[in-house]
Image (cartoon, rainbow, N blue to C red):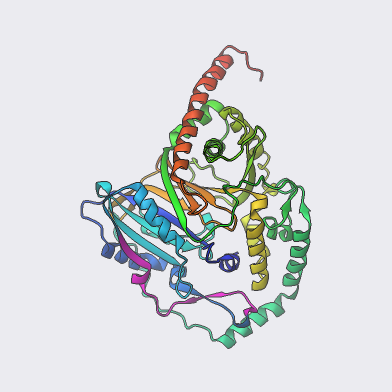
Amino acid sequence: MDASFWFMESAATPMHVGNIGIFDGPGAGFDLAKLQKLIGERIAFVPRYRQRIREVPLQIGRPIWVDDDDFDLLYHVRGLALAKPGSRQQLDELVGRLMSRPLDHTRPLWEMSLISGLADGRFAIVTKTHQAMIDGLMGIDISQVILDGEADISSPISVGSWRPAPEPSGLELLTSALSESIAHPGVALDFARGAIRGVTSIASDFGRKSLSAGAAAVSFAGVAAEPAMHISTLNVPIGADRRLATGDFELELFKNVRRKLGGSVNDIVLAVIAGALRTWLMGRGEPISARSQLRVVVPISTENIGGSSSSIGPVSAFLVDLPLGEPDPVVRLRQISYQLAQYQDVSHLLGAETMINMISYAPPTLHALGARLASNLSSRLYNVAVVNVPGPQHPMYVAGARMIGSYPLMPLPQNQALSISLMSYDGHLCFGVNADRVAIKEVESFMSCLRESLEESTRAANVRGDRHLRAVDQGEVAQ
């Protein structure tokens, strides 16, 4: 999986994930030197962040991680500033430019920027991390190790000094790759045969049938029985430049809709997004009929986004058709809840672990083929990716400064001009929307559509929910 992300990257599709953390400034102040000192004290907890990628000569094996013997912390942790008082829109514009630039492949694949000058004395910490370095919700990111659950925590327990391990020679890399091929001669061949079958066949029961390892590898590269509706605004060739929008919503508002209308918080989130996309696309002149649907891929963990558990379950991918043509927010919610209910059996899910195990010994040429094929055909499978990231429901701090919001940013694959990410944190849902700068010029208006959709759902829940409760009290609802 890591190698797939490495080979998938191109100038127009950098494969790094991002995050914007916004903080209230501590009384003692916060500057670049303090952040660099904190990273220096804690980077040992994420050894990968001092490693870079080394490719095997002739590409007869997968790339490997090697310690960077010239690691330069000051290169990776940088300082930027907005003209005071910086607004949220100005911050989004600056971060959009940061996210447009690929990471340096000759160094460890991450960057962190401290952005000062925000209004009310606030500052932001922006991270960029290549997907090859971190496996979604199950990995550890550099931003996690600098955050504390209390304001007065200083330095962690010392883990000793670091010395880079010697880098293997080209001959050693070749020998190791050949040994791996000899030890597992049938795996790559089986994968190649499975990939060819998967690409040339139609997955007519995708998402409703248990997938074998070979099928899982190409499930996003094959053609679904019913391809996703083409959305001219969203499914277009993209360039390298990005445009971002971020926003905050009270988690309790989503929970209130759930209490009155049923379903899960995830259901409510998708229903609100469906309403926002309906309004937003209609405002852009996209033809929306009564039967219009927009297909989203939703990688989520088994924990609910508003759950109290601190553990994160396995991450799986769902395909959900959002009923854009339905004007009634309650009916939209019912249709989405019904679809997600079909995925309750974990044997019906496409699990990330299955894909990782399947690709374990595939040559890099097959990694590149599968990744690029999936990217090229992704618009036929889905229109938009929506990623829910469960976060802590209590305040987090960096060197005493309280984090007031955390906004995840997901990369764009080919022919996908929009991605939607959200994270639950301390009683809020923090949205991060990433868009192609040329294809979508008014991404900030999508945040307004989200707020209107949530208000619409809240009004409907207040009317229908109260009516439903009265009917229950009067014994008029069939059990």
Q: Position of residue 364 (x, y in %)?
A: 64, 72
Camera-side residue of 41 and 198: 198
> Looking at this rendering, what residue extends furthest in the left direction?
28
Residue 145 can be seen in this image:
yes
Q: Is residue 64 left or right of residue 199?
A: left
Magenta stretch encompasses residue 63: yes
Camera-side residue of 81 and 176: 81
What residue is drawn where x is 58% and y is 33%?
263
What residue is drawn where x is 62% and y is 13%?
476
Q: Is residue 25 left or right of residue 364?
A: left
Q: Position of residue 398 (x, y in %)?
A: 32, 55
Camera-side residue of 406 and 471: 406
Q: Is residue 343 left or right of residue 186?
A: left
* Magenta-highlighted residues: 59-80
Vertical comparison of 469 with 358: above or below: above
- Residue 345, image quadrant: top right
State the quadrant of the N terminus: bottom right
Q: Position of residue 173 (x, y in %)?
A: 59, 83
Q: Position of residue 134 (x, y in %)?
A: 51, 62
